Image (tube, rainbow, N blue to C red):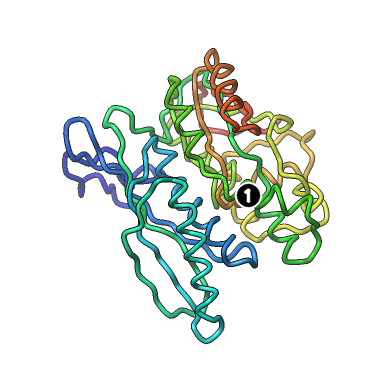
Amino acid sequence: MRDMTVLYDKNVIVGMDTSDDAGVYRISESEALVQTVDFITPIVDDPFTFGRIAACNSLSDVYAMGGRPITALNIVCFPTKKFTLEILKEILRGGLYVLKEAETQLMGGHSVDDPELKYGLSVTGVVRTDRAVRNNTLKHGDAIILTKPLGTGMIATALKAGAVDDPVVKPFIGSMTTLNRTASEIMLKHGIHACTDVTGFGLIGHLSEMLGDNKMEIIVDSRSVPVLPGARDAARGGLIPGGMYRNRDFVSGLCRPDRSVAQDLLDICHDPQTSGGLLIATDEKGAGALIAGLHAAGVADAAIIARVVTSKSKRIIIK
């Protein structure tokens, strides 16, 4: 791909060239806009819940950049011959519910008649120019923290097969409808070095983006990775989304899994996530204080899952 930086003016702080979560554009000496867009297909049957999940998923990219979302536009692809407008109303109501929680103003949107239902948001946020967080600015000795458990793709696949019950569904939905707002606000109180969120590329895919062009090694402790209830059972039962295989193949050149890692847990590390948590890199000495702050604020599943060291080449080791 041609170097996109030649297309940027001096006010672009973060563009497309680093696969970051959102674009950041300076509007004054001290403030910048954060802009992102995302939409998804239904992951649950209930339209109101789907709207909430999609909105949380769309807002997450702004939080990952250290920003505060302020406005949003609905994006809707709706099969008018397949579903009633009452379903669309409930989806939009779910999205608005989350926007109110996030103190973000809905400004309008756009809809098209489409064979496949999709919903999401274009979100604009603000961030101080000196506090915009990048995804590829790791440092030697960093600890990497994950703020939400993995496994939404596995459980969604099991849900479609009718192979899950309420004790699994409740935390699955709870995780995806939880904003990354609190985690973002807490991390900004600590000296973090990098951040991204975990979505469709899975944990390892997003860790590979954090590596960027840096000759560093990320060592993942698979036993420390938080996992949703029922996800490992789904993986062991073969209820695996197709995206997992694509994610695994995409990072195969970087990834070095240890033979001791259980296959189901390894699969979950590549599982495509919806509205996943933040991946936060911070100095190892300060990681404990950040974890304590996250836990105290209610981000109960936050855990240190990996560490970063300089290396002769880029790679991700899973132990």
Looking at the rendered structure, the kind of residue marked 1 is Arg
Please give the name of the residue rendered at 47% of the width and 40% of the height, measured from the top-left corner.
209
Residue 8 image position (x, y, % from top left)? 20, 46
Viewed as shown, does residue 303 lie left or right of 6? right
Residue 235 image position (x, y, % from top left)? 77, 52
Q: Decide: is 315 above or below 248.
A: above
Q: Nearer the viewer, residue 186 or 244?
A: 186
Viewed as shown, does residue 14 lie left or right of 288? left
Residue placed under numbered mark 1 in the picture: 248
Please give the name of the residue rendered at 21% of the width and 39% of the height, measured from the top-left corner.
26
The residue furthest top is: 285
Please give the name of the residue rendered at 39% of the width and 73% of the height, measured from the top-left corner.
111
Please give the name of the residue rendered at 41% of the width and 29% of the height, measured from the top-left corner.
137
Secondary structure state at the residue bearing disc 1:
helix
Viewed as shown, does residue 5 lie left or right of 125? left
Q: Nearer the viewer, residue 208 or 290?
A: 290
Residue 313 image position (x, y, % from top left)? 51, 29
Residue 142 image position (x, y, % from top left)? 52, 21
Q: Nearer the viewer, residue 155 or 95?
A: 95
Determine which quarter of the picture holds residue 287. Answer: top right
Q: How many marks?
A: 1
The residue furthest bottom is: 81
Task: Give the class, few, some or many, for how many residues have Cα within 10 Å of label 1's Cα (few <14, many ≥20).
Answer: many
Determine which quarter of the picture holds residue 284. Answer: top right
On-image quarter of the C terminus: top right
